[in-house]
Amino acid sequence: MRDVAIVSVAQTHHRRRVDELNEVELIQPVIHEALEGAGVTIRDIGFVCSGSSDYLAGQAFSFVMTLDAVGAWPPIQESHVEMDGAWALYEAWLKIQAGHADSALVYSYSKASPGDLPRVLSRQLDPYYYGPLWPDSVALAGLQAREMIDAGLIDEKEMAQIAHRNRTNAESNPFAQVKGSAPVDELLAQPFLSDPLRRHDAPPISDGGVAVVLAADDVARRWAERPAWIRGIDHRTDSHQFGSRDLTTSPSLALAAEKAGATGSFDVAELHAPFTHQERIATEALGLGADVDVNPSGGPLAANPMMAAGLLRLGEVANRIMAGTAGRGVATATSGHCLQQNLVAVLEGEK
Amino acid sequence: MATEDRTITPFPTGLWSQPQPSVPPLGADEPVQRIRVPASLRYRYNPGTATTRFLRGLQDKKIEGEACPSTGDVYVPPRGMSPTVGLPTTEQVEVGPNGTVSAFCVVHIGFGVNAPPTPFVSALILPDGGAVSLYGTILEIPIEQVRIGMRVEPVWVADDQLSTSFQNITHWRPIDEPDVAPELLKGHM
């Protein structure tokens, strides 16, 4: 196995609605900031991989237009996943492991604002049984929260505490969209959004993106003072049929964590668990103790650009390792409804 | 329609073979052959900064591209980036309105509500001063006379019909100018 590291990270200031820019205008400054952070240009990069979704853009092959931001002439080696950018990073990591590249640019983005996001996300369901019923993403997360409450695994107060902690953390994140929180008792006095979920239990709807530069071995050491080495990475999935799952757990997340070697102690964890109760499922699946700093960035409850929020978690952990404020961290990314599919990465600085 | 001139080559045996289904027989039940699942999503689309400038220009019968800060190539319609270098285009450059046919095809099977009667000519038109071609239909000339290098001009909708839409140009038609040599269109096809 080659040593591969995140050496540079850049992101947008995430906002509810970025009306004035199209996707390529949105992501271009971020791509170039990430390259500049590594002190390189696209000519130095061996492989480019992006993550985005046509269902969010409302446009077929939308990623091809966003490639205009990269500078793809003369031709570059390029790929795309219709998934969160964390899976684009996984593809790039494989490409580097296979020896086909020594470095990679990975980026992902979305504007959720042109469409009705919870309804758009219902199209992830199968087209025969659940799809025709149009259950939206918030209603499905509500079912999951209800199962957890009924099983005595969490209560509404603890969910509000999770919201409060994340959004208070976000106050120190200049890129966050939702910063600060009303006190927990005030949160609990609010009406339901999708019983038992209140507004604070749901992530914001965001327009935004993120870009990351990966490099292997000595290239990584040249491009960053303190690279954030990827010590393990794995992704797994649970059934697409949420009716056949135990929604109170995430076996795929636990298995991905095991395969990625996510055991032992961590200084920081950035969890892509968009709804409050899902953070509890994620900390359980990873076996994180109370000593771990969970979502110091505010996590997806502070900014949740679809297709980017997972890669952002890896970026936030990497930023802390590159800055020397953390030694070892774990990041997760999720896709589908109710934490269906999950990726886990373990990142570490030089000892 | 003549079908005898459209021979279909059979695929090699086995290429599209399917495994035998392992589903148990349905007995007396009629198999469900299809279900209808209507789905629609509505989007409020924003074209972005550069394309907004382009669409505003069309309202004034101007075709405005944007120049690459590195090569000077003018892209139209602009998306805000120079695709070769990945840098924002900031300088607006009016192109055309006349242009040159850089490629065309004769359409025999029409589609879309606004398609002209078939056969008609679909073409790529390189506007004067632009680095890339625009899509349009060519009318007001017998189809067998359309050729690469032919000079054309846009035909606009009536002034009171102008909007921020590419549909402002109903079609393109020939103008009385010498053809452009195909070599000069190299790189712009």
Image (cartoon, helix red, strand yellow):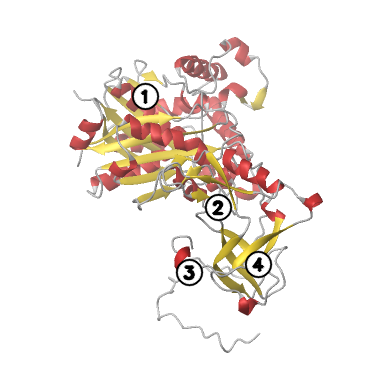
- Tell me the subunit letter for badge 2: A
Q: Disc 3 on helix, strand or loop? A: helix
User: Can residue A338 be seen here?
Assistant: no
- Towards the viewer: A39 or B31: A39
Give the residue type that dot 3 points to: Pro
Spatial distance from mark 1 to mark 2, Cα to Cα? 35 Å
**1 or 2: tag closer to the N-terminus:** 2
Which residue has dot 1 on it? A269
| Marks 3 and 1 belong to one chain | no
**Label 2: few (<14), some or many (≥20) within 10 Å?**
few
Which residue has dot 3 on it? B182
Spatial distance from mark 2 to mark 4, Cα to Cα? 36 Å
The residue shown at (46%, 83%) is: B10
| Marks 1 and 2 belong to one chain | yes
Give the residue type that dot 4 points to: Ile
Q: Are marks 3 and 4 in contact (CB under 8 Å)?
A: no
Q: Is residue B66 above or below residue A280?
A: below
Spatial distance from mark 3 to mark 4, Cα to Cα? 17 Å
Which residue has dot 2 on it? A60
Spatial distance from mark 2 to mark 3, Cα to Cα? 32 Å
Give the residue type that dot 2 points to: Ala
Q: Quadrant of residue B173?
A: bottom right
Give the residue type that dot 1 points to: Ala
* Image location of residue A24, percent across then percent down: 50, 41
Which residue has dot 4 on it? B175
Quarter of the image for the N terminus of chain B: give it: bottom right
Spatial distance from mark 3 to mark 1, Cα to Cα? 61 Å
Q: Are marks 2 and 3 in contact (CB under 8 Å)?
A: no
User: Which residue reaches farthest right?
Assistant: B160
Q: Are marks 4 and 1 in contact (CB under 8 Å)?
A: no
Q: Quadrant of residue A269?
A: top left
The residue shown at (67%, 50%) is: B40
